[in-house]
Image (spheres, rainbow, N blue to C red):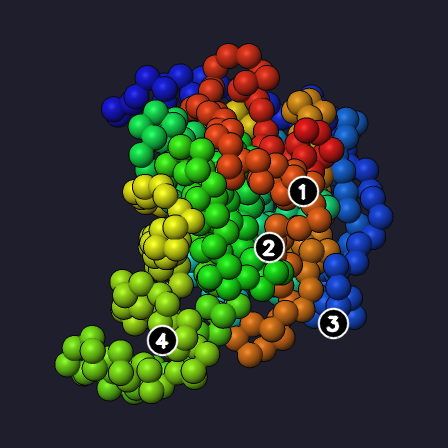
Amino acid sequence: MNLSPLQKARYDYSPKLPGMLRNGIAEICVRDGAPTESVADQDKIRALFPNTYGKNEITFEKGANTSAPKKQVVGVILSGGQAPGGHNVICGLYDAIKATDKGNVLLGFKGGPSGLIDDDYIEFDDAYINEFRNTGGFDIIGSGRTKLETEEQFKIVTEVAKKHGLTAIVIIGGDDSNTNAAVLAEYMAAHNTGVQVIGCPKTIDGDLKNEDIEASFGFDTATKTYSELIGNIERDANSAKKYWHFIKVMGRSASHVALECALETQPNICLIGEEVAAKKMSLADITNYIADSVEKRAANGENFGVAIIPEGIVEFVPEFSALISEINELLAGSKTEEFNALPDWAAKYDYIKKGLSASAFAVFDILPQFVQQQLFLERDPHGNVQVSLIESEKLFSEMVKSELAKRKAAGTYKGKFGSQHHFFGYEGRCAFPSNFDADYCYSLGYNAFMLIQYGYTGYLSKVSNISRPADEWVAGGMPITKMMNMERRNGEDKPVIRKALVELDGAPFKYFESHREEWAVKTSYLYPGAIQYFGPAEVCDLTTRTLALEKGRN
Ligand code: FBP
């Protein structure tokens, strides 16, 4: 195989386990914690999960292993978008399985949850696993976005599990995938299949976290990768002094990624979707906010800057969400064909003007034409506008440009405005995991097997105290139902893990809020540079600013 020097060197990296998991499998015992309740809607969640609700939190500690020995055949899947460290979850799981008994088996189901339905799998061995240690990507078995949620799918999974003699299934995924892990665990328990289900918290978006799960894996590496790139752009901007860079960063719903990048790089502007929604900001409000920074910097002779835009921003703008709902209605069913048959954009524009309410049309009308057209191009399988395809980095730079033209005409703005656009998303999802993610992920996988060995089901592998050095990390498990509440999804009330959005009274946002006025005007860039894998711990093992601030450290 063709290997880069870094890949070879990373094979030799030994991920760090939490102190209590370091003495070998025979020396890990369980300390029972308190029974749990769901975050809300306790009666409803209890009724929906009669076999798995209310179980105790548990912690592992050093002591004689008291689990009942049995042959373990474990199946694992990767679910959803890639996140750095996924390979190490599987490596940690594999090592714990084999350290317990060489005869134990780990099967990897390919291409995400559909691999379990299609019974498409490989059996891992040392040679195969060793090629993926400490590397980025999900190519070890692939991933997918099929949802495991219907009774029919669960029946098939039960058959597949029976065929292989599976004792447990590990689902590595985000909030939706772990919600489905909880439902599958309940199904397996209710049908006495003997198959345990364990989840692992993954997503670069950082929105699967709560008082128990301090961070989802991949967030650390992805944000460090984007921050390196943003820092490089800031330095370029500060060198050339001629462009405003509008940088969109991934994060489908929550703005944790944008906020962390802002904390690491101190740009002039960073929009936070949750704040936009809370303050009910309009597109014009956002445009003016950015234009004010451009104008003030221009007055200081600085005709350059950097603005970070979270991927999901437009859905947080109330007037924009209302416009999207009306467009979805306007083109519902056969009306899409009618619309597509119109001869040119002028006819389509006319059709839109007649079909939208006056307020929705007013919002539509201030959008640059390329965004107007994007709204009517590609639809998702339900016929809805795909908001994630809207180039919001270009939208805001265009709107700022028009606003500046007005200010120039009024004589208040005298600068020059040139813009560049970037979208950072896929660049970070498969990066070599940082030492933190390599250690955290390996620990999550290793720990997942300890939960299996001790017979737990419907639990999330939990490693906490992660802002401290790894020997102080605490390994254990928490029932997934503890994170659930009822939410309306596609017209039905469903039990789901509550998504963690940016908290406007949380320490990371507060820190940003208290500095952003200064950053908006004065060039205050920070250049974090590339992720370091070898060198002093204070550089290589550094976790995110978000985590540090949440734990009360500046
Ligand atoms: P997960 O929540 O599944 O981890 O995926 C997150 C994410 O990286 C988002 O930030 C992004 O919007 C999305 O995946 C893109 O995925 P896709 O390429 O499948 O559309």
Q: Which comes before the other along the chain, label 1 or label 2?
A: 2
Q: Residue at x 39, y 77 (%)?
A: 361
The residue lying toward the viewer, choosing from 474 and 275, is: 275
- CB atoms at circles 2 and 3 under 8 Å apart? no
The residue at 26%/25% (across/down) is 1
- The residue at 58%/50% (across/down) is 207
Looking at the figure, which quarter contains the C terminus? Answer: top right
Mark number, residue 275:
2
- Mark 2 and mark 3 lie on one chain; the one further toward the N terminus is 3
- Mark 2 to mark 4: distance in Å? 29 Å
Q: For mark 4, does the 10 Å Cα neighbourhood hold few (<14), some (14 to 19), or many (20 or more) residues?
A: some
Identify the mark nearer the N-term, 2 or 4: 2
Residue 268 vs residue 364: left or right? right
Q: Outermost residue, top direction?
A: 535
Which residue position is annotated with label 3? Answer: 44
Alpha-carbon span between mark 2 and mark 3: 31 Å
Residue type pointed to by label 4: Gly
Q: Amino acid at mark 3?
A: Lys
Instruction: Tell me, yes or no, whether the two marked residues, 3 and 1, touch with CB atoms within 8 Å.
Output: no
Check disc 3: other Cα within 10 Å, few if <14, some if 14-19, many if 20+. Answer: some
Q: Which mark is residue 383?
A: 4
- Could you say where residue 404 lies in the image, as x and y percent from the top left? 37, 52
Mark 1 — residue?
510
Q: Residue at x 24, y 86 (%)?
A: 338
Q: Secondary structure at mark 3?
A: helix
Give neighbour class at mark 1: few <14, some 14-19, many 20+ (Cα, 10 Å): some
